[in-house]
Amino acid sequence: MKKKSKRTKGIESAYPFDGMSKVNPNAAGVDIGADEIVTCVASNETTQLVRGFGNYTIDLHAIADWLAEHKIKTVAMESTGVYWIPLFEVLEQNGFECLLISSRSLRRVPGRKSDVTDAQWIQTLHSYGLLESSFRPQADLISLRSLLRHRRNLVDHRSPHILHMQKALLQMNIQLSQAVSDVTGVTGQAIIRAILSGVRSPKMLASLREPGCKKSEEEIAKALTGTWREEHLFVLKQAVALYDFYSQQILECDEEIERMYAKTRADWVAEELLPLPKRKRSSHSKNKFHETEKIRGHLKRLSGVDISLVDGIGVSLAQTVLLECGTDMTKFPTEKHFGSWLGLAPKHEISGNKVLKNTTLKTKSRAGQAFRMAAQSVKQADCAFGVLYRRLRARLGPAQATVATAHAIARVVYRMLKYKIEYDPLTVNEYQKQYEEQQVKYMQKRAAKLGYQLTPVPA
C-alpha cells in the first residue's frame, strides 16, 4: 500500500524575530516536496499559519484559493527540481506575484530542519524583503525555451551513438575515421550504410567517395579492409539505427519549434533581414537547425534586432541567448548586472580594504555558456573581439581571455536588446586606434601622478 503523506494543518507559531518592519505584509512562503506542499502565511502580527496540501492539480488550485482567502499578494518558493513548475504556473494564472528563490538564498543554521520550519523561514524572509527572485524570461518564451532545451538533450543523446559506430568499425580494423574527417558526413554515412547492406569490397566502398573528399579512392580503400566480424556488424547496425532515430526526433523537434515560433507574438512584424557575412554562411555544423533563415526571422521579430550578426554568435547561439535571457533587458539595470548574472564578471570579496578573491562565480547559466562558446569561435577571427582575445591571452592566459571576451560580447548584446539598435561592428583598425588612445590616456594619468608630463615624439 502506498504510504499516505501526513498533511500539516493549522499549525501556529511565533515569529523567529521581532523588531523589523515588514516590507511585504501580504506574503506567503511555500516549501515544495515530492509528496507534500507546505504553505505558510501570516495569521496576525505575531503568529504564522502553516498548512499542508497534496501535489495533484486540484490541490494546487486549493492552495491558490487558500492564499486568496488570506489576502496574499506575493508568494516565495524554493526552486526544488521541477516540482515547483506546476504550482508556479497555477499561482501566476491566479494573479499572484511569484518569486522563485535559489537554495543559496535560504541557507540557515543547520539542525531542526523540517518542511514546516522551511516554509516558515521562507515566509518570514519574504515578508521582511530579504529574498531576491531568480530570473525567468517572459512567460510567452518559456515554452520555446523548454523545446530548445529538449532539442539540446536529443543532440546530447545522439552523440554517443556516433562513438559506438566508430568503436565497432575500429574493432573490425576499419579505419574509416582516418579516411574521412567525419563519419556522419556524406561519404562516411554512404560507406557505413553500404557495409550494412552487405558490401565488403574496399574498392566498391571507396567508390562512394564524394568529389570534395580530401583522400583519394586508393587511400580510402586501404582503410576499408577489415575482419567483418558478425558481432561488431550487429553493434554497428544498432548504433546507426539509434543515430537515425535521434536524427528523426531532432527533425520533428525543429518543426515543432518553428510552429511554436509562429504562434509566439504573431502580431509582431519583423523588418527585412540583412545577409549574413560570408564566414557565417559557410557553417557546416551537423547540429544546426534545418530552417536556419526562418529561425533568424523569428528571432528578429521577437527581439527587434538581429543578434546573429554579432561576431562569434550564429543563429543557434542567438536562439539560446534570447530564450534564456528573454528580450526585456529592463530586468537588468545595467550591463554589469547582466554580466554578473551570466557568471562572466568577477565577484570581489573585500575585507579590510583588501581584495581577497575576485574569481567569477560558478554558474550553470546556459546563456553564459553560449557567450563563452561565442568567445571561443572568434579566437582566430579577423574582428575586434578576436583582437581582444589574442591581446588578453598573451597577458592573462586562454581561460581568463575567454571569459573577458565573452563578457565583451555580452555587453554588446545587452545594448542591442535594451536600446533596439543593430550591430555595428568595429573594424580591426578602429579597435586598435581606440586601444592606443586608451593606453595614451592611461599613461598620461600615471605620469601626472608622478609629477611628469608626456610629450609626443615628432613623426
Image (tube, rainbow, N blue to C red):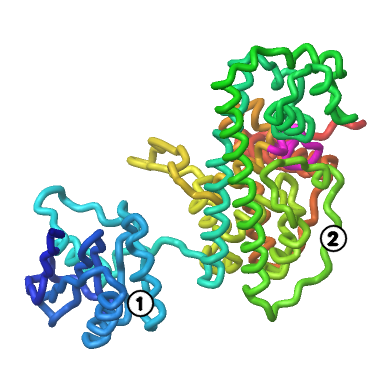
Residue 396 visible in the shown view: no
Q: Quadrant of residue 210?
A: top right
Region in magenta: 377-388
- Give the quadrant of the N terminus: bottom left
- 71 is higher (above) or lower (below) than 105: below
- The type of residue carrying mark 1 is Leu
- 15 is higher (above) or lower (below) than 106: below
- The type of residue carrying mark 2 is Leu
Coordinates of residue 245 in the picture (x, y in percent): 59, 45
Q: Which residue is mark 1?
A: 91
Q: Quadrant of residue 384?
A: top right
Q: Residue furthest right?
A: 459
Coordinates of residue 188 in the picture (x, y in percent): 74, 29
For the point 49% across and 53% down, the residue is 341
Number of dots carrying numbers: 2
Q: Does the stretch in magenta take in 275?
A: no
Q: Which residue is mark 2?
A: 274
